Each structure stands twice: as structure tokens, then as C-alpha cells.
Image (cartoon, grey):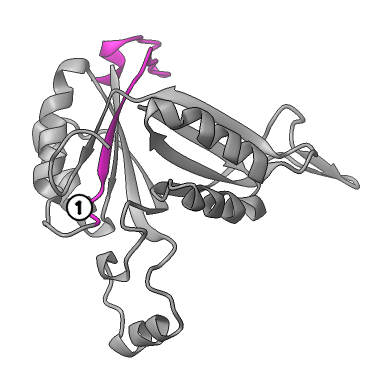
Amino acid sequence: MKMIRAILRPEAADGVTEGLAEAGFFSLTKINVFGRGKQNGIMVGTTHYDELPKTMIMLVVEDKSVEEVVKLIKYKAYTGHYGDGKIFVTPVDNAYTIRTGAAGL
Amino acid sequence: MKEIIAIIRPKKVVPTKEALEKLGVPSLTAISVLGRGKQRGIAAELNIDIRPDVLAQGIMAGMKYMEYIPKRLFSIIVRNEDVDIIVETIIKVNQTAEIGDGRIFICPVDDAIRVRTDEQGDSAVL
């Protein structure tokens, strides 16, 4: 299992989640976060914004689905400008459903 | 070291915290998040009571489910040998036999550092 964490533009998040739902990945968690990237925030005129609002989408999928999900997120979140976000893939050892107590997704 | 990521009902936050404290694991990070699961966010799994007329309105408009359900995310970092008992406790406290009880993920963590004392590894998370 892998955990995929994508930090996206807030306005792109809905498009991404809809695309994921169409592809069969309904389960996900959405978190509003603040952060900055390589460009160190943005300058608008003379005002410097250090931390920008972003939306983090977090989902855990089986190993074989990772490539498909990453491709989908990349396609849906792309604008070609700075600030499109990043995707992180990290390992997950185990998952449990609380209602049944069963291991696995 | 392992990170336990538990996504639970907001209603169950206090009982879960109390149960973890009894185990001697009082440290955790809580984030309020929005999410949906396999059932695609059915309104009945929501933790607040919705007025029946509002619910009927939504169903008439063709909305069978909500997009996101408010949940609480707990991130707890513990030693390898403590994982099983903590997972067991969280499952026991949070079970309601209805959908929407949440999910637990166990992720590996390479290292932890306590900023105050510069400790590293297992002693930093105790």
C-alpha cells in the first residue's frame, strides 16, 4: 500500500477529486494547508506573501494503482504555472477499518 | 518507529484521547479534515443531526450523498512494539457498528528528534 499526498491549488482540488471518483478512487481526505515552495511565496506588487493557501489531498491505494492515481492528479491539476503543487508517495505498512477491525483497504 | 494515522469521528475525539492517556500515550497531533470513504459520504454517517425536511430537499434535488464528511485526523508516532495495542484500543473505542467509523493507517518513520534536548530515535518519542 502507498499513501499519496498531493498539495494542490485550492481551485484545482475539486476537479482532481471528481476525476479520481470517476476512476474509482472515492475514498480520500482533504485538508486545507498553508505552505510555500521553491519560489519562496509570491510577490504581488510590493507585498510579499510567504505562505500560500493550498489544499492537500491524501489517499491510500494499492501499489498497482499508484501510477494511475499520480497520472490522473498530474493531468487534472496542471496549469503550467508556478504553484501547481507537488505529489508525495510514501509507504504504508498496514491499514485497518475501525468498524470491522479488519486489516487491509 | 511507526506513525499511526487514524481518521475518526469528531464525536469520539475525547473518549479516544482518554483511552490513549490510560495507555501512557498522551502525545498526538489532531487535525480537522474533510473526507469520504468507500460509501461516498452518505448523509446518515454524519455526526450531526440533519433536519428531515432538509435531507428530503437534498434527495429530491438528486443529491444522494454529501461530498465530504468532517472528520478528525490523529497522527501518533510510537515505538514499533506499541503499535498493536494502540491500534486495538483505537478500534475498541471508536467502534459503533455503523459506517463512517474511520480508518487507521500505519506508516514507517525513519527518525524522530526532540528539539529541546536533541535526543534522537526511540527516546525522543517516549
The image quadrant where one finds the N terminus of chain B is top left
Image coords of residue B40 (percent x, y): 36, 58
Visible residue check, residue A52: no
Q: Residue shown at 69%/31% (left/top)?
A: A37
Chain letter for mark 1, please.
B
Vertical placement of residue A88 versus A34, above or below: above
Q: Which residues are magenta?
A: B100-126
Image coords of residue B92 (percent x, y): 8, 44
Give the side of residue B35 with respect to residue A54, left or right.
left
Image coords of residue A101 (percent x, y): 13, 41
Given the image, on which type of amino acid does mark 1 rest? Val
The image quadrant where one finds the C terminus of chain B is top left
Q: What secondary structure do most residues of the magenta stretch adopt?
A: loop
Q: Which residue is mark 1?
A: B14
Question: Is residue B117 rendered magenta in the image?
Answer: yes
Residue furthest out toward the bottom: B53
Nearer to me, A68 or B85: A68
Question: Is residue B72 rendered magenta in the image?
Answer: no
Vertical placement of residue B48 versus A10, above or below: below
